[in-house]
């Protein structure tokens, strides 16, 4: 049974290296939660776009916000993990250290929440996609699968829903606001940004200026 599960996973990883990812593990999880809660209505909004049709501002914003070493590491930011372990050992609010690669592995193949099982699976899948996909494809899948709001998956759905434009036409300010609600788009809202989200948006804008343009490094 385990052999077939591993084989199925490897097949999906190879297929998703080339095919659009139209449905993800997190989408399935949200749908199941809604189904179990008879009062909840859930409808996923998602439209796949190639990376060339997504604003470079959004690429820059999510890397600035979520994983500034994305193009340098092999899937894991060891320095960030070490800092998170020290921070969490002091009994404060739990801080994560997931890279864009790890988040992509979780979003596409697994589920949300914290458990050692999920983290272990996530680590293995992260290594697989780093090897089979490469950075450009990982960023493309991430930007098409990450949740920007309840049921709003990917850059195109978010751009259309929140700003009435295509993902290709997102401005720097809009891109930074979308990135500011990550990785908790159920608590932080694009449509009604809190003072914290606005402050984070401004921080992201400054970081975007300091980073080498991501889209140029991916060529």
Image (spheres, grey):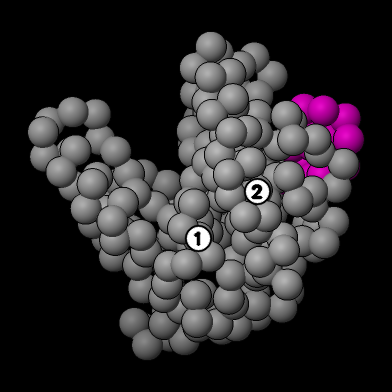
In this view of the protein, which residue sits in the foreground, 83 or 25?
Answer: 83
In this view of the protein, which residue sits in the foreground, 51 or 20?
Answer: 51
Instruction: Please name the residue that numbered disc 2 is placed on.
Output: 60
Q: Residue at x 62, y 61 (%)?
A: 139
Q: Pick out the residue farthest to the left.
A: 90
**Residue 21 in sight:** no
Q: Quadrant of residue 210?
A: top right
Q: Quadrant of residue 5?
A: bottom left
Magenta span: predominant SS is helix
- Please state the horizontal and vertical placement of residue 118, each as a whole percent of the image: 33, 58
Q: Is residue 136 magenta?
A: no
User: Left or right of 116: which side holds 207?
Assistant: right
In this view of the protein, which residue sits in the foreground, 23 or 55?
Answer: 55
Q: Is residue 164 magenta?
A: yes
Which residue range is magenta in the image?
Answer: 155-167
Q: Residue at x 67, y 55 (%)?
A: 213
Contact? badges 2 and 1 (CB < 8 Å): no
Against 101, residue 82 (above or below) is: above
Instruction: Please name the residue that numbered disc 1 is placed on.
Output: 70
User: Left or right of 136: which side holds 123?
Assistant: left
Label 2 to label 1: alpha-carbon separation: 11 Å
Quarter of the rendering occupied by the C terminus: bottom right
- Please state the horizontal and vertical placement of residue 97, each as a whole percent of the image: 34, 49
Kindly state the secondary structure of the residue where label 2 is placed: helix
**Mark 1: few/some/many CA within 10 Å (<14, 14-19, 20+):** some
């Amino acid at each position: 049974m385990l052999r077939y599960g591993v084989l199925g996973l490897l097949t999906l990883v190879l297929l998703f290296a080339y095919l659009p990812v139209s449905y993800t593990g997190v989408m399935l999880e949200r749908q199941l939660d809604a189904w179990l809660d008879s009062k909840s209505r859930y409808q996923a909004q998602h439209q796949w776009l190639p990376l060339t049709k997504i604003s470079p501002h959004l690429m820059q914003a999510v890397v600035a916000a979520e994983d500034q070493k994305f193009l340098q590491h092999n899937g894991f930011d060891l320095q960030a993990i070490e800092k998170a372990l020290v921070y969490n050992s002091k009994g404060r609010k739990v801080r994560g250290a997931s890279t864009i690669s790890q988040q992509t592995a979780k979003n596409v193949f697994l589920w949300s929440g914290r458990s050692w099982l999920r983290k272990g699976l996530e680590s293995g899948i992260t290594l697989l996609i780093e090897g089979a996909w490469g950075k450009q494809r990982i960023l493309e899948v991430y930007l098409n699968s990450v949740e920007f709001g309840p049921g709003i998956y990917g850059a195109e759905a978010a751009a259309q829903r929140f700003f009435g434009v295509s993902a290709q036409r997102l401005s720097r300010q809009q891109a930074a606001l979308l990135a500011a609600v990550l990785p908790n788009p159920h608590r932080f809202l694009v449509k009604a940004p809190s003072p914290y989200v606005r402050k984070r948006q401004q921080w992201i804008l400054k970081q975007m200026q300091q980073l080498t343009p991501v889209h140029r490094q991916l060529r």
